[in-house]
Image: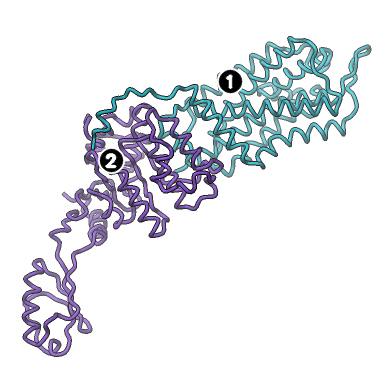
Amino acid sequence: MESRATTQPATRTAPSLVSLAFGRTRVELLQFFRQPEQVFFTFLLPVLFVVIFGTIFSDEIEGPAGVEPVPFSQYFAAGMIAAGVMSVTFASLASTVSMEQHDGTLKRLAGTPLPRSAYFAGKIGLALTTAVAQVIIILAIGVTFYDMSLPSEPGLYGLFAVVFLLGVASCSLLGITYTRLIKSANSAPAVVQPPFLILMFISGVFFVYSMIPAWLQGVASVFPLKWMVQGMRQVFLPDWVATEDYGGSWQTEWVLVVLVAWLVASFLIARFTFRWDRSGG
Amino acid sequence: MHPTLPVHARDVTKSYGPNQALKGISLDIVPGEVFSILGPNGAGKTTFIEILEGYRARTGGDVTVLGVDPGQGTAAWKARLGIVLQSSGVFEKLTVEEVVGHFATFYPDPLPVDHVIGITGLAEKRKARCDTLSGGQKRRVDVALGIVGNPALVFLDEPTTGFDPSARRQAWEMVDGLTGLGKTVVLTTHYLDEAEHLARRVAVIVEGRVADIGTPREIGGRERATARITFRREGSLASTPFPLELEHHEAEGLVTLPATEPTAVVVALASWAREYGFEELPGLTVTRPSLEDIYLEMISEAPATGSKE
């Protein structure tokens, strides 16, 4: 009866982390795209925002004398890209990971040899894919219907990539960390959405940032969204907007510092507080 | 450390604050057997199993599972375990084939996916999404995910709860199939007939202690337990005095008497009946207590005494 065990020494090597991470990402994408309502709300909401705000606020933002005004849709779409990234990373992961903590999915995976990092890699792979798709959709609608223009300087595309990737990474880890505060699977939306909505308001996604009271700007500056919005506006808007709205400069170095700080902090907190099983009592 | 035994536990304890959930569990499970762990809810079964599976840390005692301390279990160790949990209803959007195939990629030496789908009776449902399956079919997916890694040791936690009788029979055949592959199976169940049918040995855990370990036939002294004889006093038998100096009980003609030597009692009763013209003792039955009777007796008396010894 034991012959199988003894005649088969451990010559077969364990699957590599890279192949497992891709396998997990594939399964995450399959599960995501097979839930039409989830796909619909993930992509429709930012699109609706762009359409509604682009239609209602069709006027332009006037700068100081002698500069070209900026269409509000351009201003808004840049912020919406940042908010969209946070939505598909922070908000989506906090909800879905929390659900998997409570329904036993994570417990089941923890009982297999799958490395824990492969699970997170799959989640971030899903977040990255949906974030890319969302950016493409927002840009396509903005450019086609709302006179949005794309940056002309190649350097700004580099900046876009850095802010985008740092935003995806830090907000994904933040979402995973945030699951610690979600006590039951049903309460996830109630615990996740209100802080996210408040952040969207005080980070100037929907308004011209300089209209927000200074003390609220101070609160927003602690969190990553304000800096992602600021980074995206640097990519899509002329420099005079920084002078008007962000106190003189785009503060690119601060955008990077704050996002990296959130990335590191979220990773460390998740490392020590993340729960693999909250399905039991 | 026991490299040859699938499970080796000595004086395993677990405390949650002042509550001692496990008060010292010792047992060995040998290769190729189906070992069933029985016990009422709250007796510590799940705690003990989850310590073996590596989900929980123990407070004291020694455990090795496949020669490894489960508290130090590596991925290579987990690759040799198959864990079938109680919960199900996940991976709803994947097909049976996709989810079993996905889990197969976690292991260095998995069983062929087609084979696993076949032996779990899911061949017809391989292309079906999990959210379209019945409860019993979902449970089979759970089992398929537990065995696809070709484990040496399989934990089955209440594998047939909620099954109809024919689905249970099929599940039993599946477990028999696992032992046919040389696997060791640790089975927890609430169904005593299931343990009796499948398990080579059972352990009864009560109040965090092992009340007894043995084969289903001998556990709790079942083989030596007092038999019970019943028959009816009909016709002339009813009007004659009872022939034996034995404690007995009679109600509406039905006689019940315990017997430590039932054969001798039946012989004596038969010759008495023949005197009064009965070749057959009317309605004769001789029964030993079922595993369930023994089990219920063990779980009702054990808490009072604390331990069997």
Kindly tell me whether residue A164 is visible in this rendering: yes
Mark 1 lies on a secondary structure that is helix
Chain shown in purple:
B
Q: Which of marks 1 and 2 is in front?
A: 2
Lateral position of residue B231 relative to residue A59, left or right: left
Residue B138 image point, x, y percent: 47, 48
Q: Quadrant of the N terminus of chain A?
A: top left
Provide the residue designation for mark 2: B184
Return the chain for callout 2: B
Query: Viewer-proximal residue, B73 or B195?
Result: B195
Residue holding disc 1: A263
Q: Which secondary structure lies at badge 2? A: strand
Q: In which quarter of the image is the C terminus of chain A?
A: top left
Q: Which residue is drawn at 38% across and 52% down?
A: B160
| Horizontal side, residue A220 vs residue A265: left or right | right
Q: How crowded is mark 1: few (under 14 residues within 10 Å), some or many (20 or more)?
A: many
At label 1, the amino acid type is: Leu
- Would residue B292 appear left or right of A162 to someone viewing this image? left
The crowding category of the residue bearing disc 2, from other C-alpha atoms within 10 Å (few below 14, some 14 to 19, many at least 20), is: many
Give how far across and how far down residue B58 sits, in percent. 31, 35
State the hue of chain A.
Answer: cyan
> From mark 1 to mark 2, how far is it between C-alphas?
45 Å
Relative image position of residue B171 (x, y in whole percent): 37, 51
Tell me if residue A66 comes above or below residue A111 in the rendering: above
Q: Can residue B18 be seen in this view?
A: no
Task: Indicate the colouring scheme.
Answer: by chain
Q: Left of A93 or right of it: where is A155?
A: right
Picture residue at 9% right of the left edge, 87% below the top: B276
Looking at this view, name the residue that lies furthest to the right: A65
**On residue A245, which mark appears?**
none
The chain to which mark 1 is attached is A
Same subunit, tags 1 and 2: no
